[in-house]
Image (spheres, rainbow, N blue to C red):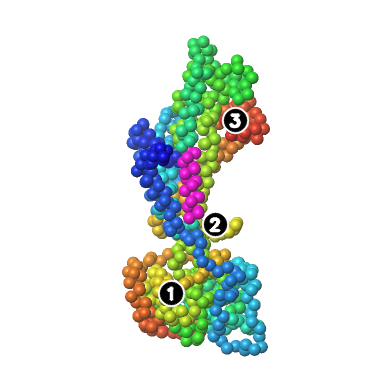
Amino acid sequence: MRLKNQILLQINKYHVLYLALFLYFIWPSRFAMVYYENLKHDDIFDNLLKKTSRNSNIIDKINCNYYELFEKNQFFYKDPFSSELLNEAEIKQGGEYWPDNCNTLFSVAIIVPYRNRANQLKLFLRYMHNYLRKQQIHYKIFIVEQADSKAFNRAKLFNIGASYALRENFPCLIMQDVDLMPLKLGNIYACTERPRHMSSALDSFRFNLPYYGLFGGAIAMTSDTFIHINGFSNMFQGWGGEDDDIYARLVNKKYKIIRFNPSIAQYTMLKHSKEIPSPERYQFLRSGYLRFDTDGLNSLVFREIGLKSLDLYTNILVEV
Amino acid sequence: MKKPKNMRILSDIRLKGSKIELIVPLILLLVLNLIAIINLECCIISFLVFPVIIAACYIWFAKKHSRTNIFLALSVISCIYIVFIFEFTLPLLELLPQENFIFVTFIFLTVYFFYKTYNQSALNKLGTSEPSKETFDSSTVTLISPEDEDLIESDDQDSDLPNVRNSCSSCKKYIPARTFHCNICKSCIIGRDHHNYFFNCCIGRFNHKYFLLGCLSCIFTLLLFANLALTSICHPFAIFQLFGIMFLLPDDCSEVFNDIEISLCFVAAIYALEMALVLLFVIIQQLVLISKGTTSTEYCFKKEKSLNRYSCFRNWKNFCYI
């Protein structure tokens, strides 16, 4: 008891200050996530939504085998695949592909917003066509290009791309930035029932996840989910905010997001100068919940300038 | 160079020295950092100038044999500077809590070891550790300079010849073997290695261990800081993976000077790397000398007989169990 009193007496305000400083230094929420809910190699295939948009000849072919993909989880971002486009003839007009020798289980529309980054687009298409064909999925790449000189509206371009993809009955939408490249082959471009954040181990974030609610970069969700949450907000102009807004929309409709294991979900980000964040983004974000049902896919207004079916992609040129 | 972060040392500086000795290194560091964050050329120039200024100061003070708190203040400020940059300006959301914990732990270890180095230095001084044994009537002694080679033969640990005694001309008293006078501390130092301006004390028998441990943990902290800072502000790549932990290195730092916070982190990382480079030389020198069973002072006086007394292993054993 006496000893206890002595110890108590020795504590002065400096000790409290040191302790506060130490606690602040090791406070966990200032840092990246140590652990987050993720799907391991073995569980991925069972969780995928097996649905296609094409009624191909199902009878005469067997289903494609995907086990090797997850088993090997090969590192794919290396020389022949990232530097040149292999077997270009396999790719159909409009940047579409499905495997001919087996019956694929997944149909995916890949929607990429784009403006003025011709060099990155070239690298992206070259690598992604090599990468996605290896995964034996049916996919189509939509490049949604903003034609006007207003601030880049990433969210609205996603909505536009999604509306085109929904017309072609794609059951799964993947929304990705043009500067992101998946590194591992196991990161299959297909949807899980739960909305999926695909780029959870991004190299420019040191392969860590900064916070649980991060839902930007590359995301995958089923068309039903996308329609249910009313898509992205159309209001976010300039850089930032729209990814947090769509996460809020998902939470609002009681969806829980899922991620793949960090050893699978590795992405690399191509070099480019950082955009200046839009100053109004917090304001829109804070009032975002008021517009969940009114602002989005159902209030989408845009002007189509051109819809071109090119060799490697479908180009949707729009004014937002 | 090294960094004891302790309020007592800070207050020592304030009380003993004038405030200028604290302000000069602070301003030097601030000005050089402000120049360095402008662009790459300024960064290179300021980091070439910085060690030159420090080395010039060091040589000047070493020639004058005078005590100064400038270097001690510089070590303390550097430590606070690096901790501040790490905890407040680095994009911490990209770092794991474990990495921060390791960094904070090693900062505390480094400070503890260097504080111990500073604290234990008083034990090295002859007269404070063994006063009764070593005080001797100076008038009866024929003075022999410690530079005299032939007389410093016996290691005091296993000395069979108690009659052969050395003495110090400045203190006018008998000294045990391997003891040298320090003009800055104005005292004889047992097992003197060198006088360290960065802690304002001599490195001798009783704090040599702590000094080496401090240097090792300091270089680890600095390299860890530089790696964490550069990989989080630059574009990193994974070199290898061990037990699920990825080891990253930066590969493209071309855009660090666009943003002021990022360039502050970059400059701090380069500063840490520069200090680590200097420390690396110190550590290599220490390791070689300890393996040979000698100290810097003995090596400077070219005591060939003091080299390779025992095997390397025994030298390290002697060093560790004092």
Q: Is residue A39 left or right of residue A150?
A: right
Q: Amino acid at mark 2?
A: Leu
Q: Main secondary structure of the magenta part?
A: helix
Q: Which residue in the protein does label 1 denote? A: A254
| Same chain shared by disc 2 and disc 1 | no
Q: Secondary structure at mark 3?
A: loop
Frontmost residue, B153 versus B255: B153
The region drawn magenta spans: B97-114
Q: Is residue A269 magenta?
A: no
**x and y percent of residue B274 in the render?**
49, 46
Q: Which residue in the protein does label 3 denote? A: B294
Categorize mark 3 by other alpha carbons within 10 Å: few (<14), some (14-19), many (20+): many
On the question of residue B85 being in view, the answer is no
Mark whose residue sits in front, 2 or 1: 1
Frontmost residue, A168 versus B40: A168
Q: CA distance from mark 3 to mark 2?
A: 39 Å
**x and y percent of residue A315 in the render?**
48, 81
Q: Residue furthest top?
A: B140
